[in-house]
Image (cartoon, rainbow, N blue to C red):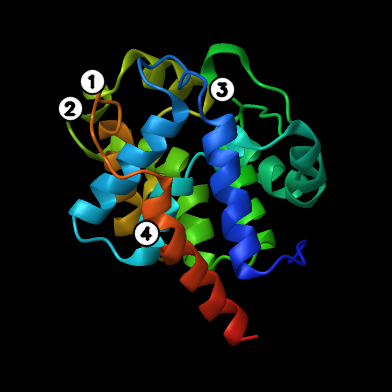
Amino acid sequence: MSTTMLSPSETTSRLLHILTSRGQSDYIGEPISQLEHSLQCASLASLNGADNETVIAALLHDIGQFLPAEEVRQIAGSVKDMRASKQSSTGKSQSITGDDSGSVGRVGHETIGGQYLLSLDFSPKVAALVESHVAAKRYLCATESGYSEALSDASKTSLEFQGGSMSEDEVGQWKRGEWSEEMARLRKWDDGAKIIGAVVPGVDAYESMIRKHLEERAATV
């Protein structure tokens, strides 16, 4: 699904502008900004030897929080059925209308972000990693001793709105999925990317990586 006629360079500039212009607000319930969180997450991925697609996903994993409400509404129609199917497994209704949900942020932002990046011709892997970062928390809560206790208070609060720990059946399905290990690693970098005053590369450090990724994608069409 492609909703853009922008060139790879234009798309890259647009995304980085969204991050820098809309990411200055507080990261919901945490002591740093959303932009600082995204940059720290990308830095952790890079320092731990992740491939470029995973680093890009780490940088953009919360893009669904940044998008203007009008863009979210355009995406919402195409993912409504997907969110409904997730509701059936969690028993919780989740809105993707573009409204913010108080102290836990925009509910469904992971699906919004993943589908938005697909619409910009990012790879399925980048989109899947972005879309999985909430489910990965649920997976780790169910499978890794001590993980849930180590979550920040804000992350524990949002977990309640995200379905809680995975069931045994959900865990089995998760393990059979593609990129499940990368998804879990990205989630741990997400959890660790909340350090006040951390010095990490800025958005410009990822400009060429994102542009090259999109150029390579365009060349395969």
Establish if 210 lies above or below 17.
Answer: below
Residue nearest the observer in this picture, 39 or 143:
39
Give the spatial CA distance, label 4 vs label 1.
26 Å
Comparing labels 4 and 1, the label whose residue is closer to the camera: 4
Vertical relation: 28 (above or below) 128? above
Residue depicted at x 56% and y 22%: 105
User: Are there few (<14), some (14-19), or many (20+) residues within 10 Å of tag 1?
Assistant: few
Mark 3 or mark 1: name the one nearer the start of the chain. 3
Tally of numbered tags: 4
Where residue 88 appears, as percent x and y from the top left, is: 64, 38
Tell me the amino acid under the disc marked 1: Glu
Q: How far apart are marks 4 and 2 (CA)?
A: 25 Å
The residue lying at 72 percent from left, 65 percent from top is: 6
Residue 163 spot, x, y in % from top left: 50, 29
Q: How crowded is mark 4: few (under 14 residues within 10 Å), some or many (20 or more)?
A: many
Q: Are the residues flagged by discs 4 and 2 in contact, CB closer than 8 Å?
A: no
Left or right side of 198 for 205: right
Q: Residue at image x 47%, y 45%?
A: 61
Which one is earlier in the sequence, the residue at label 2 or at label 3? Answer: 3
Q: Are marks 1 and 2 in contact (CB under 8 Å)?
A: yes
**How far, Cα to Cα, is label 4 from label 3?**
23 Å
Q: What element carries label 2?
A: loop
Quarter of the picture holding the N terminus: bottom right
**Amino acid type, mark 4:** Thr
Residue type at mark 2: give it.
Gly
| 198 horizontally vs 182: left or right | left
Which image quadrant is residue 29 in? top left
What is the number of the mark on residue 146? Answer: 2
Q: Identify residue for label 3.
A: 105
To which residue does mark 1 refer?
149
